[in-house]
Amino acid sequence: MIDDLPKGFKAGAAAASFKKAGRDDLGLIVSDRPCVLAGMFTQNLFKAAPVLVCQEILGTCGTARAVLANSGQANACTGEEGLDNCRATQKMVAEAAGLTPREILPVSTGVVGAHLKMDLWRDAVPALVQSLGSRDAEGFTRAFMTTDAFPKFAMREVTLSGGTARLTVMAKGAGMICPNMATMLCVALTDADVERAPWQAMFGRAVDKTFNRVSVDGDTSTNDTILGLANGASGVAARSEADLALLEEALTAILGTVSHMLVMDGEGASKVIHITVTGARDDKDAELVARSVGHSQLVKTAIYGGDANWGRIVTAVGYSGAQFDPSKVGLRLCGVERFRLGRPVNDDQEEKLAELLKAKDVDVEIDLGGGPGGYTFQASDLGHEYVTLNSDYRS
Amino acid sequence: MIDDLPKGFKAGAAAASFKKAGRDDLGLIVSDRPCVLAGMFTQNLFKAAPVLVCQEILGTCGTARAVLANSGQANACTGEEGLDNCRATQKMVAEAAGLTPREILPVSTGVVGAHLKMDLWRDAVPALVQSLGSRDAEGFTRAFMTTDAFPKFAMREVTLSGGTARLTVMAKGAGMICPNMATMLCVALTDADVERAPWQAMFGRAVDKTFNRVSVDGDTSTNDTILGLANGASGVAARSEADLALLEEALTAILGTVSHMLVMDGEGASKVIHITVTGARDDKDAELVARSVGHSQLVKTAIYGGDANWGRIVTAVGYSGAQFDPSKVGLRLCGVERFRLGRPVNDDQEEKLAELLKAKDVDVEIDLGGGPGGYTFQASDLGHEYVTLNSDYRS
């Protein structure tokens, strides 16, 4: 086990057989002192029970000490019974770990509409609490994986004026991924000493530049949650504007690393499409164009097939809802210009493009030729594996 | 050949080898007298050259005598050269058929960004014009098929106070189908005698209830065109409110028949998902919900796999952008209630549902429990065949 958590944090996990036996599906992180919190949650109107409970804690307390994660059942669309179950799991863990229930932030992932299996929870909680300190970031991350092909986590150090602090980010997500405020589940820990207001503010900006700009399938989940816990255990303070800027830069970078992993491991995805839009009337129009291209089934299947079918990209630009002059639009695919001032660029580079399209990361650059607005967005391609996984997910 | 065109219309077709040799890929319909026109076109900002030309004719002339259709090249995103080519094809056919260029409505489908192959056009036009009268509705429809698995056309008679008139509708479309105003290509002919204003008005309403409520892949094409030509050759007039209502009813019914075929033959589609939303704040919110469910990749793959994963449907309702109270929402899948007042209905009907989900048509009924708004929408499922077709469409 590598000691890759920030100071003062311990992780544990247990196998509760929520869906399959023999693998960790319950995870716990505990800080030895209260943490300053930041959090962003799904915009889906059906917010899962753990989302509602986390929002309540962030809205009233502002600090917490633990994150409790399970896979198997998402506890979404489960009504009052789901909320009661969620609170009962907080209580169980609080009693076993010597915390209060409101110090524990719950996050759940799995089948939507399924209730938590409370008997299995009761059986597994003692082992979970005992395991604290036995898992690293990967160990915790594995406990809330579902169809993820690999665990997604990263560690990074940031040197501020008073010393070095650490950031660790752990995320899950492979399907139902089109984060709107935050992705499926993500926990960001730091031992930097930072106050609540600047922490939440930089967290919001960093998430907006990273997790809110990726999509696997355009489906915004009921459980999207990203939590930021800062416990100050390093003794390294981020108070000055310069230090806050350094911390924000490091936070944005590490969230970018992990959100890219999310797209790379989109269910059945083989490639990441990096979409850059410039020359839009404003950033909002640029975003419309980027999301339209990133969500187009025809673009995603063409990229999957290594087909330089740029006409599909231009089509998705055209129906995005953004306002622009079609006769000024240009497009580069893998750096090769294919469309300029609203018409095809005729030099035939199909062979070169076919070679370039074999890469894992594919660049699509769109210039609307009309203004200062810009946006970047990452999307998965769409292949057979996506269909296979999602036409038979529950079995 | 069945004589299934309305009186006064003749159809022809020719094999020009635009993409493959040995099949009709050029079609022509000519009326023996001027037709009153109605038309609706794509909302995509990149409007194909033939769309621009048709819009010009509808905006200035109001009548025409012919429809000229080709597959192979969509003549979209082709700039000034594309417009010049489109006008040259009108001219060629006009000369050979004794018409004026502005009496000919051009429609094109095929690869976006590819130019018309003018040499092949010049070779094929004489045979095309000669063939007039040798094709029926199916024969014309086959000439503008691309990845369509079957030709989509229907014939219907309508009895008005003065006698019986005929309606024939011919459409193509299998991919890049999420019509916004009209679908890929559709031509509706009638020999009823109707004036321009009521014809365009009823046409708009009928398209809004049919073609504008279907989706295969959410991609709104650059070429969407639906044309309505009424030549009055039956001598049966639609003038009174009662007759106009009868004609509109028949038009809506036949367009509904053909738009359903479109979804049924969505690229790689095996099922049609019929989505009905009720209880919304207004029709607009109901539409948001219906489109969100119909475009959800996770819903489409679950239905493809015969998986009664209603949680994915509820999730798509939640992120639709519509406003409603989640605790009032209900859902029926294939007529079986699975969700009521925001929580799961617990009686286990999985086996019954697995059986019901084997049907070609799958009903999804969503009640938001909050108002008079409603909407219906038809969407294809999403299967392996879609990915296969679209990752290798151009080759």
Image (spheres, coloured by chain):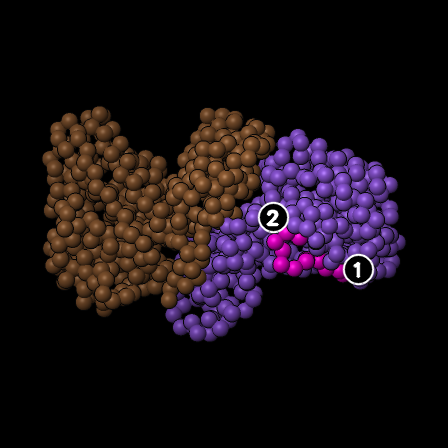
Chain colours: A purple, B brown
The circle drawn on residue A179 is: 2
Disc tally is 2
Toward which corner of the image does residue A253 lie, by quadrant?
bottom right
Q: Position of residue A128 (x, y in %)?
A: 79, 48
Q: Are marks 1 and 2 in contact (CB under 8 Å)?
A: no
Is A51 part of what is drawn in magenta?
Answer: no
Q: Position of residue B373 (x, y in %)?
A: 45, 29
Is A152 part of what is drawn in magenta?
Answer: yes
Q: At 56% across and 55% down in the image, what residue appears?
A: A267
Crowdedness near tag 1: few (<14), some (14–19) or many (≥20) residues, C-alpha within 10 Å: some
The amino acid type of the residue labelled 2 equals Pro
In the image, taking residue A201 as reference, residue B253 lies left or right, namely: left
Q: Eyeballing the image, is A53 above or below B46?
A: above
Q: Eyeballing the image, is B15 above or below B263?
A: below
Question: Along the line of sight, which residue is nearer the eye, B101 or A203?
Answer: A203
Where does label 1 land, which residue?
A4
In the image, taking residue A247 as reference, residue B14 lies left or right, namely: left
Q: Eyeballing the image, is B374 above or below A159?
A: above
Crowdedness near tag 2: few (<14), some (14–19) or many (≥20) residues, C-alpha within 10 Å: many
The amino acid type of the residue labelled 1 equals Asp
Q: At 71% across and 35% down in the image, what residue appears?
A: A85
Toward which corner of the image does residue B392 lie, by quadrant?
bottom left
Label 2 chain ID: A
Q: At 53% across and 34% down in the image, what residue appears?
A: B338
In the image, taking residue A180 as reference, residue B151 lies left or right, namely: left
Question: Along the line of sight, which residue is nearer the eye, A366 or B216?
Answer: B216
Magenta residues (range): A143-158
Q: Could you tell me how far apart the alpha carbons at marks 1 and 2 are, in whole angstroms?
A: 26 Å
Point out the tag, 1 or 2, that comes first from the N-terminus. Answer: 1
